[in-house]
Each structure stands twice: as C-alpha cells, then as structure tokens.
Amino acid sequence: MKILITGGTGMIGKEIGKKLAAKGHELFVLTRNRHKAKLDCPYPQTPITWDEINESEIFSELEGIINLAGASVNGRRWNKSYKQEIYDSRVKGTQQLVDLANKKGKKLQSFVSTSAIGIYGEADDEKADEDYSKSYGFLGKVCQDWEAPVAELEKVRSVIFRVGIVLSEKGGALAEMVPPIQNGIGGTLAGGQQCMSWIDIDDLSDLYVFAIENPISGVFNATAPNPVSNKELSQTIADRLDVRLGPNVPFFALRIAVGEVAPHLVESQRIGSAKIQSKGFQFKYKKIEESIEARVPKLNGTEKRFIFEQWIPKTKEEVFPFFAEAKNLEEITPPSLNFRITSVSSGPMEVGTEINYKLKIDGIPVNWKTIIKDWDPPHLFSDNQEKGPYKKWYHIHKFEDLAGGTLMTDQVDFKIPLGAVGYLASSWKVLGDVKNIFEFRKEKIQQLF
C-alpha cells in the first residue's frame, strides 16, 4: 500500500514508519525539508514537499494517509505567536490534506488523522468516552478545529485518534519527568491527584497501523485502559529508578516555570479506551508499571542515555564490516574533534579488543581507551570506556533487518564527572555535542552507503 505520512520525522511518526515499512508498505513523508527528512527517518521513504505534492501526480496514487503533523504543545513557552503556530500547524495542514484528498485522491482508501484528549478538558468524574463534553479552552478549540476538516472527506474511510500522554524512551513526557526524579528533585505536580491518561509508544504506533489495515472508522481515544494519577506515575518512575520521590511542585511554581500551559498540565483526565478495544485492538501495555519498565532505563544518579537511529539501504551483512573496522571511525567523526586511532590490540575485533584514540574536546587534548565488551556479528557489538573524559561511556551498536536494508541503532549511556555539579554544569552541553557528532555521522553514512 502507498501511504503518505505527515509528521513522519517526529517521535511518533518514526515508530509508525518503521512498523509500516516492516510490513512492506511504500511510504512517502510530507516535509518542508527533503534532505532532513531523508536523514531523520529511520525507515525507507520518499520525502516530498508541500509544493511537490500540490503539483505532482503522486497524490493520485496514494492509498492511505496518516496525519500526525503539528507543532509541539510543550515545545516552548506559550505566547500569541506560538499558540497560533500550534493552531495553524494542525488545523490548516489537515484542511489542505483533506482538500487534496477530495481533489486528487483517486485511489485513496483511508485517512487516519490525529487529535488529543485535550479536547475534553477536565474529565475526571468517570472514564470519559468519545461522546464526552468538549472543552472551550484553547486546547479544546484546537482539537475541535483539528478534527473538523476530516468530516469533509468524500468516499474515504476516516479515523481520528485522540491521543493521551505518550510514554517513550526517545522523548515526550518522560524526557521531562525522568531527569529530575532521577536526581531526587522531581516530584508530583500540584498535589499529584490529577488523573493522567497515558499510552505506550508501542501501542500508539500499533494503533495507527491497525487503523490503516483494518476497516474501522470514527473517533477513538488512544489511551491505555488504566489511567493513573500524577502521583502514581511519578512514584512508578521513582520506583523503577530506585530513588525517593522528590518534593511536590506547587501550582504557583509550575505557573512561573512554564507559564500559560501550566493549567493544562494539571487537568485531570480519566479517559476510556473501550471503543477501540471493541474493534479488536489489544493493548500490550495495560498497566503503567509495564510501560515504565520498558521505557525508563535503570540509570544511576547522573547517568543519561542517548539513542540514535538511521536506516541504511544495505543489508546488515554489508553494513556491519564497515563499523567493525576501528579505523573507519575517523571517517565518520567531525574533523573539529581531530579524532585519531592510535592503536588497536587485535586485527579482527573481538571481545576484549582495546582501542586507543586521541581527540580534542573544546580544543583540549584527550586520550581515550575503549574495550569491546560484546561481539556478535553482524547483529551487535558494544564498547566501554576504560580511560577517558567521562565517568561512564558505554556504547551499544545494533544492526537489524528492515525492509531490505538495515536499521542501525546506537545507544550511548554516559555519565559526567564531578557528580551533581558536573551534571548540572555540562550534561546538556555534552548531550548536545553527542547529538552533533551523530548528525555529522548521518550525513557521512548516507554518502558512504
């Protein structure tokens, strides 16, 4: 099936794209930057701009559309212009897609769009179903106007998912909640009694695939069967990390910190998902403990994790040997680091191989030694810092088959020296530096393969 995805480079879009590609669907990603989309999507796809899709005949060949586009509600502090961006990116974008579908969608069979449980506002007297009364606040209006164009579709099966709080190890709510709890300063928000309707990223991506491949239609809540209070969610994260939950954050402090979005962060929303389950969808993660165990790594104290994914149009048998050759690391590392391999203890790498490097970090010369801990060609290898600038640096390289190519995943667990002081002073800078290194690698790898 030929499927167009808007928001295909986002956290949710990436997971949906990987699953659709694994099932053999041909994917197109609607984007404003073709080159960036080509690099950022960890699955095979054809990037296409708004101008191109308006002028080309690609739209007439599409059989499905998944509409995820929209500026992040928590992307930055709200002001008049950003609120307008939140609104326009959802409402205008959806209207344009619907107009194109009606005009050019000759083969279009399904249109799966997105909304949010913010449409309900406060909803804690019972498990709200899809007919629950709508909110008249800003987010309520955004969601209602976001959903409205879908009703204009002609002769196309349509689905709208009202998405709850998405739990993922790669961003979203957990990226905001976990670090402060991990360091003992994060607690409940405004007392913690408000209900939070959540969904695991794996279930959410499965929902969109389910909607594309099955003859369902209508509006569905995309939330796990068992919502929890803010206190329960926070405590579950703390238990997973083996730390004590920090102090409660009073509402006035939250309002100072995040501004106008604060009231929406403490709205109580007990949202039901019985309707989508009645259509045959089965949740993998029904309890909050199951999702938190899967999405929150057991890192200690000031440790952080970085995950990078890239799809390469070659088999893992073709890809693995390049990354298994230590000398090749020089080719895919930014020149500004002056990265050089000085010695490798064994010819073919194996468990126990020692690799010594020299590089410069912010102009400061650094000696670095790593040891290969795991070696399972062509699927995986890992290296651990024995000597270097970090308190901990453990890097896992995974290679998986995906749609005739290879999904390469780099997972880096690192820890800054000097404990909490080092963490507060430089962890976000280090994370930024690591991201920049891997952005450079993406470009080089695309050129090489």
Image: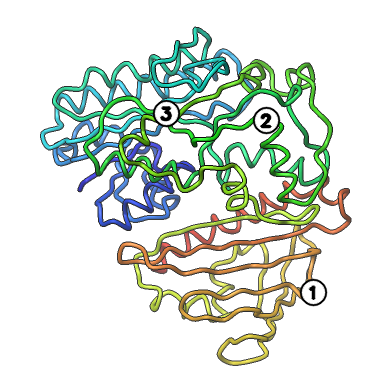
The picture places residue 91, in percent across and down from the top left corner, at 38, 19
Q: Which amino acid, by three-letter code, is at mark 3?
A: Asn
Total label count?
3
Nearer to us of marks 2 and 1 is: 2
Q: Is residue 257 left or right of residue 154?
A: right
**Quarter of the figure with residue 228:** top right
Q: Nearer the viewer, residue 34 or 393?
A: 393
The picture places residue 46, in percent across and down from the top left corner, at 29, 49
Q: Is residue 48 above or below residue 111?
A: below
The residue at which mark 2 appears reads as: 230
Q: Which amino acid, by three-letter code, is at mark 1?
A: Lys
Kindly give the residue lying farthest to the bottom in the view shown. 347
Q: Are marks 2 and 1 in contact (CB under 8 Å)?
A: no
The residue drawn where x is 62% and y is 52% is 293
The residue at which mark 3 appears reads as: 221
Q: Is residue 243 above or below residue 49?
A: below
Q: Earlier in the sequence, mark 2 or mark 1?
A: 2
Q: Nearer the viewer, residue 427 or 237?
A: 237
Nearer to us of marks 3 and 1 is: 3
Q: For the residue labelled by badge 1, is the local secondary structure a helix, a strand or a loop? A: strand
The picture places residue 331, in percent across and down from the top left corner, at 54, 71
Q: Earlier in the sequence, mark 3 or mark 1?
A: 3
What numbered label is drawn on residue 126? none
The residue at which mark 1 appears reads as: 387
Neighbor class of circle 1 (other Cα within 10 Å; few <14, some 14-19, many 20+) is some
The residue drawn where x is 35% and y is 40% is 208
The residue drawn where x is 74% and y is 61% is 361
Q: Are marks 3 and 1 in contact (CB under 8 Å)?
A: no
Q: Which amino acid, by three-letter code, is at mark 2?
A: Asn
Q: Is residue 432 left or right of residue 286?
A: right
Mark 3 and mark 1: Cα distance apart in space: 50 Å
Mark 2 and mark 1: Cα distance apart in space: 41 Å
